[in-house]
Amino acid sequence: MIRIITDSASDIVDNQREDLIILPITITFGEEQFQDGVNLTHKMFYERLIESDELPVTSQVPPFAFEEAYRKVAEEGDQAIVITLSSKLSGTCQSAHIAAQEYEGAVRVVDSENASLGEHALVEYALRLVDSGLSFEEIVEKLEKDKSRIRLVALLDTLEYLKKGGRISKAAAMAGNLLSIKPVIAIIQGEVAILGKARGSKQGNNLLAEQIQLTGGIDFEKPFVLGYTGLSDTMLQKYIVDHETLWKSNVDKLETSSVGGTIGTHIGPGAIGVAFFSAGE
């Protein structure tokens, strides 16, 4: 069997597949440590985040957690393809490589160069490739080739968490909040980039849709995921209705996902995002 191993930053919840292993990232609130997706659900995370004055701390999956997973896979005579959070955002990818040194031929590590919904899309793609009957090496080759086509764009509701994390100044956050600035961000070459800023949610939703079209559109033959941060998906559902022309004639239903603590820590509640494989080159 070919198994797929990923970290909880991929925000895949309710995993029903025997061949998918999800290793938890550690999230620390004060002196309390939690395992993302194990004893800390997305709902529990946002309840704590909203009440907390300080940002929680996220920690990479350690090498020994990967080594333990690899050992179980090898003992069963299987092979594993590991898809991790971008190496430019976390040390988790390095942990996966360190642990893989003793499992040459049985384990291959793929840096998703993405996060959350984007990583989720690549994992879903890997599972489809497994189901299609491709070989171990063929799957790795296709993942490495096609991962550059994944686009993740998101609209943030608040600048407060970027300020708390030191990514923008207090003055910039205050000015942005007064003007109802909604930044549109993306993952580009494995790092977070700001694509634009909109005044208000309506203009922000339009800018998000515009960014999707600028990439050449969506390849609906491959995984396509929409997500939200916080305790409610109201904003995401409104976005889906307002921009149904983007997907209505291409899919029967849309896969949506809540975004957990690894990314939610830095962007806060109220954000919505889309991850897809670009139809353009």
Image: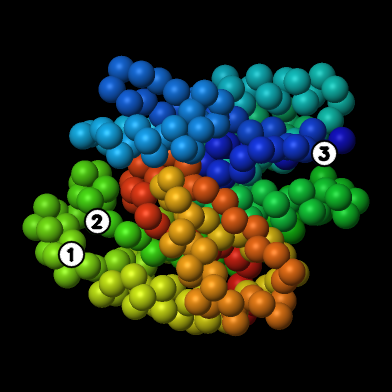
Q: CA distance from mark 3 to mark 2?
A: 42 Å
Residue at image coords 76%, 48%: 127
Q: Give the answer, above or below, for where 212 lies relative to 76.
A: below
Q: Residues within 10 Å of mark 3 (few under 14, many from 20)?
A: many
Q: Residues within 10 Å of mark 1 (few under 14, many from 20)?
A: some
Residue linked to disc 3: 2
Residue at image coords 21%, 44%: 164
| Residue 188 visible in the current orientation | no
Comes first in the chain, label 2 or label 1 = 2
Who is closer to the viewer here, 7 or 236? Answer: 236
Q: Are marks 1 and 3 in contact (CB under 8 Å)?
A: no
Residue at image coords 82%, 19%: 75
x%, y% of residue 116? 52, 49
x%, y% of residue 73? 77, 26
Q: Are marks 2 and 1 in contact (CB under 8 Å)?
A: yes
Q: Give the answer, above or below, for where 32 lies relative to 264.
A: above
Quadrant placement of the N terminus: top right
Comes first in the chain, label 3 or label 2 = 3
Q: Give the answer, above or below, for where 37 lies relative to 238.
A: above
| Residue 161 visible in the current orientation | yes
Residue linked to disc 2: 159
Q: CA distance from mark 2 to mark 1?
A: 7 Å
Name the residue type under label 3. Ile
Residue at image coords 21%, 34%: 53
Residue linked to disc 1: 176
Q: Is residue 66 left or right of residue 25?
A: right
